């Protein structure tokens, strides 16, 4: 399977996984949910890598880069994104985080020499514009999140949202040269996920209030966390690393950013309510851009 389809499949995994996260995240709280999800994902990745023999592909000199990528992309990036959501609401935070594809393209140009021209450039522009349009104009006024009425933390929320996007882009850029070697994507994901979990666990052990669970873990919530971890973090992130083996970092980031658009028909299917006109416009632009990229 080509890297374009791997990136799109990863976006689909994240879209489906996001639907599973709402109940569990509300029950546990954002930080506790993330900590449990990382633990489940790390255990699954370690087991898969052990059975597949992926650990033998890890060189000692690659561990430092994987650890640093886990700290920047998963620990700092995810934490900043959740903090931005708390200040701005999920919609506006989603718009800011979608800029990670733009950051990736810019950084890949300066540090990896990746360029886009012709129909690929047009397709990428349509795709990114479509994703942002779908998020920004994808809800009716009656459906706006209550947090969006709060303007007191607007500046810090914007800064955190952009920080999350930048961390995602930097982590992707760091991994590109490493993934072009014979390193196993599952083993690499296991190292990154374990690093992020250890740091989250450290925050919890230091008794930070934000890390505490709102309510005790239940069997139903644990199964939701487990399913989300398997789909979003084990399969989704591993697919992204596999895509980086064969594709340009900027293009992988752009194609994997379509997750908010993929989730629209899923929400319609679950809640039986058609998305707003802006969501349809954004989805149309995204589909058109994706087709141009795939036909390049």
Image (tube, rainbow, N blue to C red):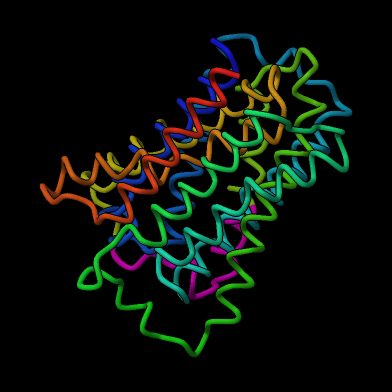
Q: What is the residue that sits farthest to the bottom in this orientation?
A: 152
Q: Is residue 235 among the parts visible in the rendering?
A: no
The structure residue drawn at horizontal position 77% and vertical position 12%, both measured from the top left corner, is 182
Q: Is residue 240 above or below residue 15?
A: above
Check the image and report above or below for 99 versus 49: below
Horizontal arrangement in the rendering, residue 153 relative to residue 217 (left or right):
right
Residue in the foreground of this view, choosing between 49 and 205: 49
In the displayed orientation, state which residue is furthest to the front: 118
**Pick the front one: 247 or 285:** 285
Q: What residue is shown at x 79% (from left), y 39% (from top)?
A: 108
Using the image, determine if residue 54 lies above or below residue 31.
Answer: above
Q: Is residue 138 left or right of residue 140?
A: right
Q: Residue 60, image x and y in percent?
A: 86, 26
**Residue 203 painted magenta:** yes
> Dividing the image into 4 quarters, which one contains the N terminus?
top right
Q: Picture coordinates of residue 218 (x, y %)? A: 24, 51
**Quadrant of the rendered structure where residue 227 is?**
top left
* Residue closest to the eye, 169 or 33: 169
**Place of residue 139 in the rendered image (x, y in percent of width and height, measured from the top left):** 28, 62
- 104 drawn magenta: no
Residue stretch in magenta:
199-215
Q: Residue at x 37, y 42 (%)?
A: 283
């Amino acid at each position: 399977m080509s890297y374009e389809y791997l990136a799109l499949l990863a976006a689909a995994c994240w879209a489906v996984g996001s639907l599973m996260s709402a109940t569990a995240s509300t029950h546990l709280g954002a930080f506790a949910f993330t900590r449990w999800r990382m633990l489940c994902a790390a255990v699954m990745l370690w087991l898969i890598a052990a059975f597949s023999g992926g650990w033998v592909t890890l060189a000692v000199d690659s561990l430092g880069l994987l650890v640093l990528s886990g700290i920047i992309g998963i620990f700092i990036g995810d934490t900043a994104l959740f903090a931005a959501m708390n200040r701005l609401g999920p919609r506006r935070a989603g718009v800011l985080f979608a800029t990670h594809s733009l950051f990736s393209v810019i950084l890949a140009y300066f540090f990896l020499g990746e360029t886009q021209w012709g129909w690929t450039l047009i397709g990428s522009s349509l795709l990114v514009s479509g994703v942002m349009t779908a998020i920004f104009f994808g809800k009716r006024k009656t459906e706006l999140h209550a947090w969006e009425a709060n303007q007191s933390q607007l500046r810090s929320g914007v800064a955190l949202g952009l920080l999350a996007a930048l961390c995602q882009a930097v982590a992707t850029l760091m991994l590109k040269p490493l993934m072009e070697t014979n390193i196993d994507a599952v083993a690499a994901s296991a190292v990154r996920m374990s690093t992020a979990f250890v740091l989250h666990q450290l925050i919890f052990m230091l008794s930070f209030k934000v890390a505490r669970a709102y309510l005790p873990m239940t069997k139903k919530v644990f199964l939701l966390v487990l399913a989300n971890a398997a789909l979003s973090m084990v399969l989704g992130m591993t697919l992204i690393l596999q895509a980086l083996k064969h594709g340009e970092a900027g293009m992988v980031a752009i194609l994997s950013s379509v997750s908010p658009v993929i989730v629209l028909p899923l929400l319609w299917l679950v809640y039986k309510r058609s998305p707003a006109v802006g969501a349809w416009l954004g989805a149309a632009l995204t589909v058109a851009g994706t087709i141009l990229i795939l036909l390049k």
